[in-house]
Image: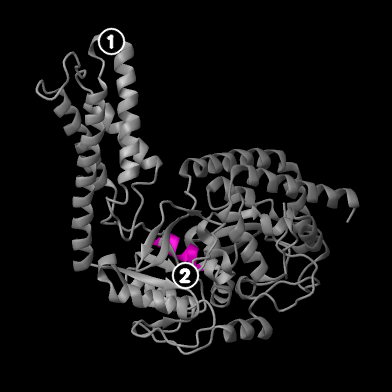
Amino acid sequence: MTMDSAPARHTGQGGTGPAGGTAGTAAVRRSVTAIHPPRRPRAEQARPLARPQRVRRRDGILPLLTADALAAVLTTTALSAPVLSAPGAALPAGAAAPMAVLIAALHARAGLYRPRLAPSALLELPALAGRAAVVWCAFAGVVAATAPDGALGWQTLLGAVCLQTVLTCAGRGGVNRLRRRAARRRPASALVVGPGAGASAVAAALHGRPEYGLRPVGLAATGACEEDGGSVPVLATHEDIRRAVIQNSVLHAVFTRPPEADERTASLVRLFHDHGCRLWLADPAGTAKVTGMRVAEPADQLWGYAVQPLLPRPSRPVERWVKRGIDGLLAALALIAAAPVMGACALAVRISDGPGVIFRQERVGLYGRPFTLLKFRTLRADEHESATRWTVAGDHRMSPVGSFLRKSSLDELPQLWNVVRGDMSLVGPRPERPFFVAKFAAVHPGYEARHRMPVGITGLAQINGLRGDTSIEDRARFDNHYIDTWSLWQDLWILARTAASFFRFRLGGS
């Protein structure tokens, strides 16, 4: 286990002190043009967050799939007609369905169903013709092997490839035409993210070219912005950007430099992704390199600017359920194995500090939902003071028994029951009190993004020594990195590191 407090000097980096709060606020204090009147000041408590809901899009892949499948069916039907088929050549009955499935699979593999700002069926013609040739050659080989008398001749094969290419190109051209017409009538709200004149130029291009279907409602400045955004409001703070996303139902975010360029831009990626926004990279200089996210091909253009969709890592729901099952099983086994130790800890707390062995406190969990965290009591304090007071080493309220439980992390053992109940996970960001969640989120843009995953008993920040009175900014950065790169193997690695640190403490005799 890891402890929530460790001997360390209070540096003020947590964000609540004068140094952390003033510096962080001054860094983003500048003139802001609001899209809507600002809301009332936020109360000094954690803001409940609903689970992000994916928005419905009108640019799905179903129309393109239908066009491709219809082209395959029409081509197969045409070649089955006695007038068009070559002598002796006969297509087997029911060939249209597998042909349509194969064509769709190859197109999906080539990225031909990915979103485009300026789609063109003619530009896709070589890719469409090549995949049609592959499918029909494979089909002709199967027919020749299973029914030699009905083998397709070269003329029939060439005619099938050409006919399907023409029909597919025509169908996709019709779909693209309808989409452009709908985009002009009902453009989707978009935010342009980036610093300086490059972001302003991209926003101006979107504003003046409605055929791309994006209506810029704000410019999220991520660096020094010496000029305004013209007709587009400039959003300087993380809260302004969040409010713009919600109030304007933003569906697209156009970045003008790689999202991992700085921590603030990376936190905006998480914000947009959690609200179901589609992400694009439009590079005015043409030199952007993306390493943290997958870049879809083929490339696209936005009024001459190279633009590509950014594809975040999938959420992997099956692995999340496996994580939950492993957490519940291991926590239940650990509760049984640790029962004697927990009994001894409870007896020591009862003798040393009196009644009230278990300490209950409200913490913020997954998607900002509050839950009751369980610990062995280590402090002599009332519940309200503990909810708004930061605990440091050498606190006069801590008894010798409480100090030992904190240093050994034995006070965290009751949280195994939180894991069994589903409030927590074995590995994840450490949960914090609502009062401090509100304060830290106001200063550190990436702090609230920690609640995308279940909170845990231990985590990546804790095994790197970020416990107790240490930098909140560093902890948030480690926690978000853990979420962005999460895997079951990483969870097992963190558990092994946590166990190793616990046994080092026991062997050291601290």
313 left or right of 402 in image: left
* Residue located beneath label 2 in the image: 256
Which residue occupies 66% across, 57% down? 375
x and y percentages locating residue 53 in the rendered image: 37, 58
Residue 64 is at least partly visible in this image: yes
Amino acid type assigned to the residue bearing label 2 in the image: Thr
Residue, disc 1: 148
Cβ atoms at labels 2 and 1 below 8 Å apart: no
Q: Position of residue 159 (x, y in %)?
A: 22, 30
Q: Secondary structure at mark 1?
A: helix
The kind of secondary structure the magenta stretch mainly shows is helix
Q: Earlier in the sequence, mark 2 or mark 1?
A: 1
In 3D space, how far apart are the residues under numbered discs 2 and 1 (Cα atoms)?
57 Å
Q: How many marks?
A: 2
- Direction from residue 162 to residue 52 in the image, left or right: right
Q: Quadrant of residue 390?
A: bottom right
Secondary structure of residue under mark 2: loop
Provide the residue span drawn in magenta. Answer: 268-278
State which mark lies toward you, 2 or 1. Answer: 1
Front one among 7 and 262: 262
**Whole-percent x, y for residue 189 in the image:** 31, 70
Is 272 situated above or below 225? above
Q: Residues within 10 Å of mark 1 (few under 14, many from 20)?
A: few
Residue name at image x 54 percent, y 59 percent: 290
Where does residue 97 sit, x and y in percent of width and height?
24, 28
